Image (spheres, rainbow, N blue to C red):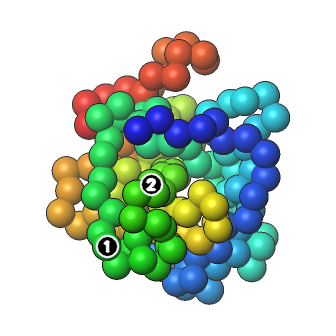
Amino acid sequence: MSQAPLVGKRMLIFPDGLVGYPEWRRFTLEGAPDGSPVAWLQGMDDEGASFLVTEPRLVCPTFTIEVPAHVRAALGLAPTQEPRTLCMLVIKPEPLTITANLLGPIVYNPDSGVACQMVLAESNYSARHPVVVTELDSGQGGGAC
């Protein structure tokens, strides 16, 4: 499933907040103007809540999840409608490392912006999946999934 690039700015509403932060419900998702595959998820309830996000398949091409019926219903997805999926990135400066949280992906309704952070308890994915950037424009992630 290919997703459209992360461009522009839109509101995402997490009715249950983020995992561990139920009070963080309103965010703006803003894609980079240069078409970069990384976007900002900026908190509106707490301006200190700001995350870099990207599409999980860019860092793990085999990434797939099954969105349960109760999550699909909470997002207001039509029976054949697919949600958009994001993962949070963590950048550590020394030594420079980038990891992706594939264990707690964000799924959202692309029409309404209703979102939730799933926890993939029965998964082999990692909360610290290494992201290897070999070329800026390659769009390839690193490490086995």
Left or right, 43 with respect to 85, comes to right
Mark 2 Cα-neighbour bin, 10 Å: few <14, some 14–19, many ≥20: some
| Residue sitting at x 62%, y 86% | 23
Per the image, label 1 sits on a secondary structure element best described as: helix
Per the image, label 2 sits on a secondary structure element best described as: loop
Mark 1 Cα-neighbour bin, 10 Å: few <14, some 14–19, many ≥20: few
Would you place residue 7 above or below residue 43 in this image? Answer: above
Q: Please tell me which of labels 2 and 1 falls first in the chain.
A: 1
| Residue sitting at x 55%, y 63% | 109
- Residue 92 in sight here: no
**Residue 17: quarter of image:** bottom right
| Residue sitting at x 53%, y 16% | 138
| Residue sitting at x 68%, y 30% | 36
Expressed as whole percent of the image width and height from the top left, the position of residue 55 reads: 51, 42
Quadrant of the rendering where the N terminus is positioned: top left
Q: Which mark is residue 82?
A: 2
Expressed as whole percent of the image width and height from the top left, the position of residue 106 reads: 48, 60
Q: Are marks 2 and 1 in contact (CB under 8 Å)?
A: no
Left or right, 42 with respect to 117, comes to right
Expressed as whole percent of the image width and height from the top left, the position of residue 137 reads: 60, 16
Most distant residue in the right direction? 33
* Label 2 to label 1: alpha-carbon separation: 12 Å
The residue lying toward the viewer, choosing from 40 and 47, is 40
Quadrant of the rendering where the C terminus is positioned: top left
Q: Which mark is residue 140?
A: none
Identify the amino acid type marked 1: Ala
Location of mark 1 (residue): 69
**Residue 122: quarter of image:** bottom left
